[in-house]
Image (spheres, rainbow, N blue to C red):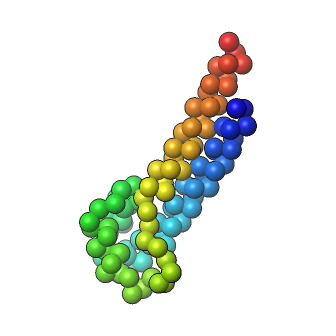
Amino acid sequence: MRRAGPAFLLIGGAVVVAALGWWWITYGEVVKYGYLSWREASDCLVWKSDVCSLATALCLGSHPRVLVSYWSSVLWLGLIAVSASLLLAGRANAASQG
């Protein structure tokens, strides 16, 4: 169980970084073309809305056809893995002290 904490941290951190990159690829162009402000695009980082879907649909011509639109659940999955690693580390510390 001790090795699970660092593994969750590594995997979760990589997923969070990948989600941020994926969001940037998708919504950087949307902001560039003025379909959304940075504030509105940052909301799309954490949840899916009709505004996010509309903006990416309007900007579809500037995106590569193979690119799948950003999925906000990926960020949440990464954050869950990072949180699990912190929980496991806290339990390991408590077990070693008590």
- Asked if residue 46 is positioned above or below residue 25 in the image, the reply reads above
What x and y, as percent, mark residue 71? 43, 63
Q: Is residue 34 visible?
A: no
Point 50% across, 81% down: residue? 66
- Asked if residue 75 is positioned above or below residue 96 in the image, the reply reads below
Does residue 80 appear to the left or right of 13 in the view shown?
left
Task: Please state which of residues 46 and 81 is positioned toward the viewer in this rendering.
Answer: 81
- Asked if residue 25 is positioned above or below residue 66 in the image, the reply reads above
Task: Name the residue furthest top.
Answer: 98
Does residue 12 appear to the left or right of 76 in the view shown?
right
What x and y, as percent, mark residue 31? 37, 74
Residue 34: quarter of image? bottom left
Point 70% across, 15% down: residue? 97
Does residue 4 appear to the left or right of 80 in the view shown?
right
- Asked if residue 66 is positioned above or below residue 19 in the image, the reply reads below
Residue 94: quarter of image? top right
What x and y, as percent, mark residue 14? 62, 55
Q: Is residue 32 visible?
A: yes
Does residue 77 appear to the left or right of 60 in the view shown?
right
Count the labels in the image. 0
Quadrant position of the N terminus in the picture = top right
Point 42% across, 58% down: residue? 72
Task: Name the residue furthest bottom.
Answer: 61
Task: Please state which of residues 24 and 75 is positioned toward the viewer in this rendering.
Answer: 75
Quadrant position of the C terminus in the picture = top right
What x and y, as percent, mark residue 51? 27, 67
